Amino acid sequence: MALSPSDDKWLIAHLTDLCDQAEKGAYLTVSDFLDEREQSLLSRSFREGRLSVSLWMYGGAPECERKVACFYPDFLSENREELLMVQLRLIRVTALDQRFLPKELTHRDYLGALMGLGVKREKIGDIRIGEESAYVIVKEEIASFICEELTSVGKALVDTKVVAWTTLPAAESGTLSVISVSSFRLDQLVSRGFNLGRTDASKWIAAGLVFRNGEAIMQPDKTVMIGDKITLRRKGKIILKEDKGVSKSGRHQVLIEKYGK
């Protein structure tokens, strides 16, 4: 379900159908995993009143980036997490002998191995790298297939099994740095935070590939605030941690935490 902008109408139609099923059948329905652009599109549609019943987006843990959309009637509000987690699984992938690996396995290695099995990206949620294993959140319907078929990642032989959610490691921490901006305009933060020229930053924003707190923002002059998370699709994300003051030249010194490239 990682769709191009031209498929937005199809995506909304598909999600609306899930919403209608939840309303008419009085049960919880669950989509495949959505990326941030798709989550933003759904949130806008929900606010505009295109969808009925309640909407909740969740990825298996509060800080997950890839999430499924859940639609449910209000009387299921207290049970929504229990009902959803039946449809998700946590898989642990462990290299059998890590002493002889030519390099440390990365997120890309694990995702590539899964895609190599023919698993569609929308069936896979977040992938977290622990000290000795990777933990992959997937839809329940493909968990058994992955455990049976995923026997290697790169050159490493691996053991693959479904494990308890309590074993999911904490999300990785980012890299702290201080950037200098003349204002809190979105294009300035994207430019400085991702080491891009202002023109390139504006192009990424105009293309709908920059998100503030999960919502696509297409106005370069939009103001962002301390605490906001800015994601540049396929490049990573930054979180504005602290305004450390204004320099003698009048520029804000902003502490950011960066994840990804």
Image (cartoon, rainbow, N blue to C red):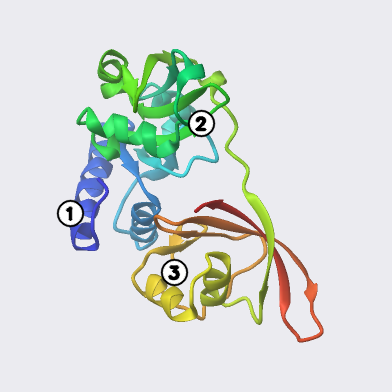
Q: Amino acid at mark 1?
A: Trp
Numbered circles on residues, count: 3
Q: Is residue 193 left or right of residue 13?
A: right
The residue that label 3 is drawn on is: 217
User: Alpha-carbon distance for marks 3 and 1?
Assistant: 21 Å
Q: Secondary structure at mark 1?
A: helix
The residue that label 1 is drawn on is: 10
Q: Is residue 112 left or right of residue 161?
A: left
First of labels 2, 3 by sequence position: 2
Q: Residue at x 51, y 18 (%)?
A: 99
- In the depicted structure, whether residue 29 falls above or below residue 190: above
The residue that label 2 is drawn on is: 129
Label 2 or label 1, whichever lies nearer to me, is 2
Residue 79's spot in the image, x, y percent?
Answer: 46, 27
Q: Secondary structure at mark 2?
A: strand
Q: Amino acid at mark 2?
A: Ile
Q: Residue at x 43, y 43 (%)?
A: 57
Question: From this viewpoint, is residue 59 visible?
Answer: no
Q: Amino acid at mark 3?
A: Ile
- In the depicted structure, whether residue 259 falls above or below residue 228: above
Q: Which mark is residue 196?
A: none
First of labels 2, 1 by sequence position: 1
Q: Nearer the viewer, residue 166 or 253?
A: 253
Density class for disc 3 (Cα within 10 Å; few <14, some 14-19, many ≥20) is: many
Q: Residue at x 72, y 76 (%)?
A: 252
Picture quadrant where residue 247 is located: bottom right
Density class for disc 2 (Cα within 10 Å; few <14, some 14-19, many ≥20) is: many
Residue 260's spot in the image, x, y percent?
Answer: 51, 50
Q: Nearer the viewer, residue 79 or 244?
A: 244
First of labels 3, 1 by sequence position: 1
Residue 173's spot in the image, x, y percent?
Answer: 63, 43
